[in-house]
Structures are given as C-alpha cells and as structure tokens.
Image: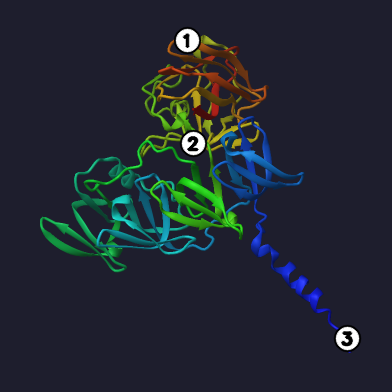
C-alpha cells in the first residue's frame, strides 16, 4: 500500500491556490510614457502613483505622472456576448453600460457590465439611452440624439422613436421600471411603455453638488463602452481593478475587460479637450466648392469632433491635379490615405490634432499650467511624403519653429508656458508641394 506524505500534499494544495491571491491575469498591455518609450507587459498592480508591469525583462515600476496610456493588446471580437443594454451618462463625464436600469424615489439602480448592482442619486445622472444593442459603437450615438443632448433644457425630456426620427417631449421624470417610464406632462403623469422610449435627458436639480474643476486621475475604458472618470484606482488581491468615479460610483473590472487606461489627465489637460477661440484656414486650389472632398479632408481635426459632424471621411479621396501658388509639379494619380485616428512612428494616439498646412489655431490657456508637451510629425499614412513647418507661440513669443518631414522620426517636445494666456499653433507649407502637407500632433498636453 502506497504511503501519502500529508505535509507535502498540503503544501501542493496551497501552491494550487496561490493564483487566487496574486495577479494571475496575463492580458498584455502596451504602455506609452512621456518619452515615447513603448513597453508591453501584464499589469501586476496599479494605483494613484504608479503602474507595475510584468514584462519579458522582469517587473518594471512606472510613475503614473509620466504615462500617457496603457492599451489592451488583445482584439475585441465584434458581436461577442451581444445583448440589449442601457447607456447611462453621468454628470462627472463617466458612461456606464448597464444590463438593467431603473429609477424610483430619485434613486437610480443599475447593473453595469461587468459588475454588481449599483445605486446612486438621480442627481448624478445627466442622460440615458434605454435600449441599445451592445455590439453598436456606444461612443458614436445617433446624430439626432447628439443634437438633443447638445441643446440645454429647462425641464426633463423624454426622447421617443427610433434613430433618424426621434421626437422630444418636455416634462418631469417620475419613475423608470422594467416595463414603463412614468413621465409628467402638463400636470398629468403618463405611463409610457419603455419599449417606445429611446432615451431621457435630465435637468440639474437645485442644490446638486458638481465635480466641476475636480482633477481626475484619468479614464478607464472598458470593451463594452463604459468609461469611468477616475477619482481612485487600485488592484485587489485577486488581480481585479477597483475603481471609483469622481461622483463616487465604484466598480471592479478584470484586466481582460479593460480596453484602455488613459492617464493623460493626471495633473494635466489635453489641448484637444479645449475649444480653439480662433481657427484660420487658407484652403488650397481645388477647394472652392463647399462640398469639395478635398476641403472636407483638409479641415482641422481633433479627437473632439463637433457634435453631429462627420468631418473625417472614411472613403479614400483623390488628390487634385492642381496645386497652390501655381506649382507645376505632377501628382501621382492615387488616393489620399484614410486618416482615422492619429498615428506617429507606429503609435496610435487616442488624443490628437491634425493641422493641414495654412492652418492656425489659437487657444485660451487655463491657469496654473507650466509645460506644453506633445509628439509631432507627418502621420505614418502619409510617410515618406509630406513636409510642413510647425510654429508654436505663446502670448506672441515664438517658442518653437521647425520643419517636419515624412522621412523623419517623430519629434517630442516640452515647452515652457508658465504664466502664458494665449497659445497659437500654426502649420505652413515648406519645400515642394508634392501632396497636401498635413501635420499630426499626438498627446498634446498642458502639464501643471
């Protein structure tokens, strides 16, 4: 009869249980730091000060204030776990994609995906879409919905119908159940079948505390479309990421469910989040028509496109045969690249600006920012072509003037803007007009 070593068996069993108390998720994330270095590894831990990565060269500890983002390297499969969801837009800027959503007695109850049941005051809710297919692009709602949300309202609004033919009704939201939406119009409360309600837009109740001006730790984006504007962030013993929004709504997500950690807002602000106070563009020959494809292509662009616009065309656009200033050089008969996103030296930036030559942007600078940091160059999809002159000024003082070429690597720059009130960026033609000269700026940040 074989003897059993009980002590050895106990040790072996404890060894099997170890992954439950350490970080076992090997989801690969790409990290971009302020120096442009890219590192790939699994997240061992993350908190308000640092990220620890498990890489092929061992563990690396990275200060959070020097990171731009961590991006999940796995690809989400379209239509995976498709279901009908509600999309809740909070006043702190967060977005919760929820399997269930109800409201009673000024309290919201929802079941975010993935997560546990969550409750919070109705005053924290800005808007809600009640019935959305989860495989849709949550971040790109219908144009008519965007127009309704952009318009200020003095009363609650109920949005009925289907995208493309939505109607709005003003009144007071009373209750949301799984079957009906109770909505008061002219003193009469109507039980509207939930299936007929596309969304709700809510006014700000008197006395509501806002989080305006609160500096967030960053953003956490999930594959399902949820976005948390972070007050706090940490990993727990089982490897889950615990997060809390600025309005103190909490959740826990597994690394595999996370699409992106965006830390660009820690002690910083993206310039693309600000609206230029002045935009000047001198379009080239061939753009006289208001609906000219080239004119559309050459519009100034940022990751914050105007509501309801489609400023970036997905179809390749033909290069015109004529060039500005009477240039006679021939242009190859080929399409312009599709410039969705911002890409420099293989890195795709979530935040950025595109300035075609003959473009000037002027911004009012917020107070207490000391440094302007950015990556600049010709977008990878233009290279090796393209040449543009970049000029940066603050309060009329020239901070930088340099020529960027498609044959060069990305330029990374930090400029002193302490005490400055106006920032001006301009792009000009430089050299031969071989094709439209388009400057891309990635992760343009104002640093405190």
Q: Nearer the viewer, mark 1 or mark 3?
A: 3
Q: Nearer the viewer, mark 3 or mark 2?
A: 3
Q: Secondary structure at mark 1?
A: strand
As drawn, the residue found furthest toward the bottom would be 1
The percent coordinates of residue 72 (x first, y second) are 60, 48
Label 2 environment density (alpha carbons within 10 Å; few <14, some 14–19, many ≥20): many
The percent coordinates of residue 128 (x first, y second) are 33, 53
Q: Secondary structure at mark 2?
A: loop
Establish if 20 lies above or below 387: below
Q: In the picture provided, is 387 more to the left or to the right than 167?
A: right
As drawn, the residue found furthest toward the right would be 1
Q: Does the residue at mark 1 contact the one at mark 3 (Cβ under 8 Å)?
A: no
The percent coordinates of residue 362 (x first, y second) are 41, 19
* Residue bearing the label numbered 3: 2
Q: Residue at x 49, y 23 (%)?
A: 355
Q: Secondary structure at mark 3?
A: loop
* Residue bearing the label numbered 1: 397
Q: How many marks?
A: 3
Establish if 426 lies above or below 446: above
Q: CA distance from mark 1 to mark 2?
A: 26 Å
Quadrant in the picture for residue 376: top right
Mark with earlier residue (1, 2): 2
Q: Does the residue at mark 1 contact the one at mark 2 (Cβ under 8 Å)?
A: no
The percent coordinates of residue 19 (x first, y second) are 68, 63
Quick check: can you spot residue 77?
no
Q: CA distance from mark 1 to mark 3?
A: 86 Å
Q: Residue at x 34, y 55 (%)?
A: 129
């Amino acid at each position: 009869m074989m003897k059993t070593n009980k002590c050895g068996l106990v040790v072996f069993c404890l060894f099997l249980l170890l992954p439950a108390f350490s970080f076992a998720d090997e989801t690969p994330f790409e990290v971009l730091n302020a120096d442009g270095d890219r590192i790939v590894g699994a997240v061992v831990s993350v908190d308000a000060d640092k990220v620890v990565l498990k890489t092929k060269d061992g563990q690396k500890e990275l200060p959070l204030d020097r990171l731009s983002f961590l991006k999940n390297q796995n690809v989400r499969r379209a239509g995976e776990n498709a279901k009908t969801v509600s999309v809740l837009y909070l006043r702190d800027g967060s977005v919760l994609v929820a399997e269930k959503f109800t409201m009673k007695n000024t309290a919201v109850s929802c079941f975010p995906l993935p997560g546990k049941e969550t409750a919070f005051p109705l005053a924290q809710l800005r808007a809600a879409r009640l019935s959305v297919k989860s495989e849709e692009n949550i971040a790109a709602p219908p144009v008519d919905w965007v127009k309704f949300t952009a318009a200020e309202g003095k009363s609650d609004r109920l949005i009925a119908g289907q995208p493309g033919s939505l109607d709005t009704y003003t009144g007071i939201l009373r209750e949301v159940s799984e079957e009906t939406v109770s909505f008061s119009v002219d003193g009469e409360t109507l039980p509207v079948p939930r299936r007929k309600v596309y969304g709700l837009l809510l006014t700000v109740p008197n006395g509501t505390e806002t989080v305006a001006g609160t500096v967030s730790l960053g953003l956490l984006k999930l594959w399902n479309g949820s976005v948390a504007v972070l007050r706090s962030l940490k990993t727990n013993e089982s490897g889950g990421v615990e997060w809390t929004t600025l309005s103190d709504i909490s959740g826990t997500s597994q690394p595999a469910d996370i699409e992106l950690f965006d830390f660009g807002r820690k002690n910083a602000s993206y310039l693309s989040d600000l609206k230029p106070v002045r935009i000047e563009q001198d379009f080239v020959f061939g753009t006289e028509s208001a609906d000219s494809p080239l004119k559309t292509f050459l519009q100034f662009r940022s990751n914050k496109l105007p509501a309801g616009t489609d400023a970036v065309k997905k179809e390749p656009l033909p290069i015109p045969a004529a060039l500005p200033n009477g240039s006679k050089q021939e242009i190859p008969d080929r399409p312009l690249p599709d410039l969705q996103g911002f890409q420099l030296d293989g890195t795709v930036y979530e935040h950025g600006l595109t300035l075609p030559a003959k473009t000037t942007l002027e911004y009012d600078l917020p107070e207490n920012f000391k440094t302007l940091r950015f990556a600049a160059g010709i977008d990878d999809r233009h290279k090796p072509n393209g040449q543009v002159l970049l000029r940066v000024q603050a309060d009329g003082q020239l901070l930088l003037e340099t020529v960027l070429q498609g044959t060069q690597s990305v330029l990374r720059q930090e400029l002193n803007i302490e005490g400055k009130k106006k920032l001006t960026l301009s792009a000009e033609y430089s050299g031969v007009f071989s094709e439209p000269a388009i400057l891309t700026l990635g992760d343009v940040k104002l640093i405190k």
